[in-house]
Amino acid sequence: MRFFYILILLIFFNCQENKTNNQPVIAIHGGAGIILKGDLSVEKEKLIREKLDEAISHGYEILKSSGSSTDAIVETIKILEDSPLFNAGRGAVFTSQGTIEHDASIMNGEDLNAGASTGTMHIKNPITLAHSIMTNSEHVFLSREGAEEFGKLENLEMVEQEYFFTDFRLNQLKKEQNSSSKFGTVGCVAMDKNGNLAAGTSTGGMTNKKWGRIGDSPIIGAGTYANNKTCAISCTGSGEYFMRSVVAYDVSALMEYKNKSLKEAVSHVIHKKLPSIGGDGGLIAIDKNGNIEMAFNTPGMYRASIDKNGKKNIAIYFE
Ligand code: ASP
């Protein structure tokens, strides 16, 4: 009998140990879209790869030093938001009115808590607002002036609209007013040493958007989702289709209710379901065992990951 009790205790302590002994895993994206080899100058491609490297390495260090997956998401996305290279924060695209309106969201897979904001114009780092809404409010989704008012109460850094105006995006707006569309949203998924999953996404939306248009990125279940039982997901692409396909939650639901692997679930949604209604884009994902998937049905997606063996991968096209 005593042997039996000792065995139970050993199993219990072993489980506790494993709970805090996961190898951290992290993945990021900087948008999917029509990124063709030759479109990017050598110099610009180098800058993008360096920024992806800087962001993912920073997030990984946070996880390595026992930071939470949500902290890693916020700090990693902040680096991408501060860069004019991506369609988020500083580099966000213009609306048809020549303004910048940010959307962001974050979700914690441990307790299914979430925070999101849309249409903010002065919060320097929209992902910090989403995080504050998640942790310090009783709400999930705040919009426009109200969201900014809450951000001020939270002492988040505010800036003038001009801070976000870049020549590159202004030229893109002028072109877009006559032609096709591109993406460039940023996102991050992470698993910390406790095995907790989290996901976050931040964007300026679509160039030339009007009428207060909101895409999938700030919508929990469409552009962002995390659940420790299944996976963490951040999407990028034609938001209208991602909302109609409830992409992020659909991947999780296929795993939870149909026992699909992460790979099978992601492949079904990105390569079958989404294109069947005309949607294009991609997503990054980590499952509860630390497996990574980065899939897209466009020519390219800016992306980077560090797996459970510490192996780093940075890519743009099908490589
Ligand atoms: N999904 C974003 C939106 O529709 C755009 C993007 O991913 O670039 O607002």
Image (tube, rainbow, N blue to C red):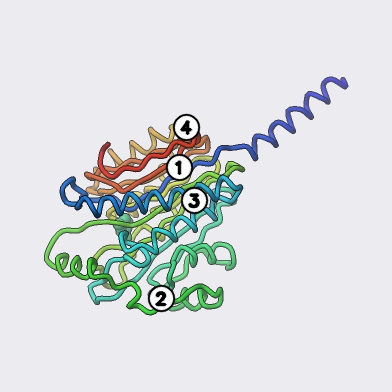
> Mark 2 belongs to which amino acid?
His
Q: Nearer the viewer, mark 3 or mark 2?
A: 3
Between residue 250 and residue 223, name the one nearer to us.
223
Q: Residues within 10 Å of mark 1 (few under 14, many from 20)?
A: many
Contact flag, marks 4 and 1 (Cβ < 8 Å): no
- The disc, 4 or 2, on the residue closer to the chain's N-terminal end is 2
Q: Residues within 10 Å of mark 3 (few under 14, many from 20)?
A: many
Instruction: Identify the disc placed on residue 252.
Output: 1
Compared with 278, 23 (above or below) is: above
- Asked which secondary structure carries label 2, the reply is loop
Q: Which residue is mark 2?
A: 122
- Indicate the quadrant containing the C terminus: top left, top right, bottom left or bottom right: top left
Q: Nearer the viewer, mark 3 or mark 1?
A: 3
Q: Residues within 10 Å of mark 2 (few under 14, many from 20)?
A: many
Contact flag, marks 4 and 2 (Cβ < 8 Å): no
- On the question of residue 106 being in view, the answer is yes
Which residue is farthest left?
178
| Residue 83: quadrant of the picture | bottom left
Q: Which residue is mark 3?
A: 59
Mark pair 3, 1: CA separation = 23 Å
Give the left or right position of residue 128, taking residue 52 as reference: right
Mark pair 4, 2: CA separation = 43 Å
- The disc, 3 or 4, on the residue closer to the chain's N-terminal end is 3
Instruction: Identify the disc placed on residue 259.
Output: 4
User: Which percent across, then down, holds residue 152?
Assistant: 52, 77
- Asked which secondary structure carries label 1, the reply is helix
Compared with 51, 3 (above or below) is: above
User: Which percent across, then down, holds residue 293?
Assistant: 39, 38
Mark pair 3, 2: CA separation = 25 Å
